[in-house]
Amino acid sequence: MKPIVEKWHCHIDITTVCQNACMYCSRYMRHTKDRGHMNLEYFERALDTLLEWPNRIGLMGGEPTLHPEFPKICEIMRDPKRNHPNFKRLMDRYSLFTTGGKAYERHREVISWTFHYVEVFEHNPNQTAICKHQPTTIAIQDVIDDPDLREELINDCWVDKTWCATINEYGGYFCEVAAAIDRITTKGSRAFPLTNDWWMRDTNDSDYKKQLELCQLCGMPVPIEREVLATGKERISEGLYNLLRSCGSPGLSEDKCIIIKDKFSREDVERNKIGWYPGQFRQDIGR
């Protein structure tokens, strides 16, 4: 697995409030029962642990601009003490990942002062009709019985290679999707405490290995047909469905999901890998 310190971003998930409830959300917002906002004291502490972090820092949610203290959060981020020699300007460190909306429009000015990179993915009708998403809710442990094959796929996971570490209200995580799974299923029991060097952990550490157990509940490593959001029904493997139901997920009604009981062999996996490019989901802009 890729060391945390080598990941291109560390996200801070500042809210679990969102105007959308999309299928296959990397934060599982459709299945998040308890919603709320990160308090400013905790946010500043989280950001302080990244003073020496050598890469970029991103704000995520939910929808981050819905945080009632969003302008204050941006002010905290612009504190000159957060400069890092790897970046010419302080704002070059910062990214915002948003679905747009009224709050985003209202905060455009402060966003322009704070963030070098802004990714806006509105999930508008055109995007939901053509953008293909990896089914996060088809847990690898449910559909692949071969433990060696599961380990191979997890060790080769495209999310681990190309996406981000994350801090949420419970602590730090090597993976943004693992953070969301842990939030829903165990209320953050596997989070790394927010020490100043939490992102320097060795992949062989015992607490790191506990986080890696969350990969068994994830569908990101599984070569499988991707889907557009316009279908409206999320495919969920049977074991994960039962786990989410025990955790009180609000997104499991019959009109919202289809329970999957399929199993995949090594031959199925190799066949499914042909033409499988799960990280390319912005067909609306050609990437």
Image (cartoon, rainbow, N blue to C red):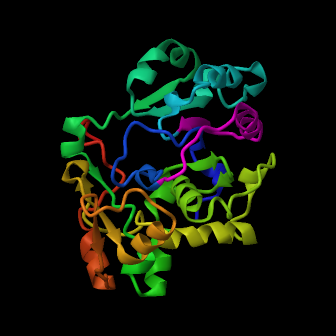
Nearer to me, 126 or 37: 37
The residue located at (77%, 38%) in the rendering is 45
* Magenta span of residues: 32-60
> Is residue 37 shown above or below 234?
above
Asked whether, in this view, residue 152 is left or right of residue 284, the answer is: right
Asked whether, in this view, residue 27 is left or right of residue 274, the answer is: right
The residue located at (50%, 53%) in the rendering is 33
> Is residue 235 shown above or below 80?
below
Residue 43 visible within the image: yes
Q: Is residue 164 magenta?
A: no
Q: How many marks?
A: 0
Residue 88 visible within the image: no
Percent position (x, y) of residue 275?
23, 62
The residue located at (40%, 70%) in the rendering is 241
Q: Is residue 56 magenta?
A: yes
Nearer to me, 102 or 136: 102
Q: Quadrant of residue 175?
A: bottom right
> Is residue 17 shown above or below 85?
below
| Residue located farthest toward the top when viewing the structure as drawn | 109
Percent position (x, y) of residue 21?
37, 46
The residue located at (36%, 76%) in the rendering is 238
Give the quarter of the figure containing the C terminus. Answer: top left
Percent position (x, y) of residue 134?
33, 58
Nearer to me, 279 or 184: 184
Percent position (x, y) of residue 43?
70, 36
Nearer to me, 258 or 58: 258
Give the quarter of the figure containing the N terminus. Answer: bottom right
Asked whether, in this view, residue 275 is left or right of residue 209, the answer is: left
Q: Quadrant of residue 179?
A: bottom right
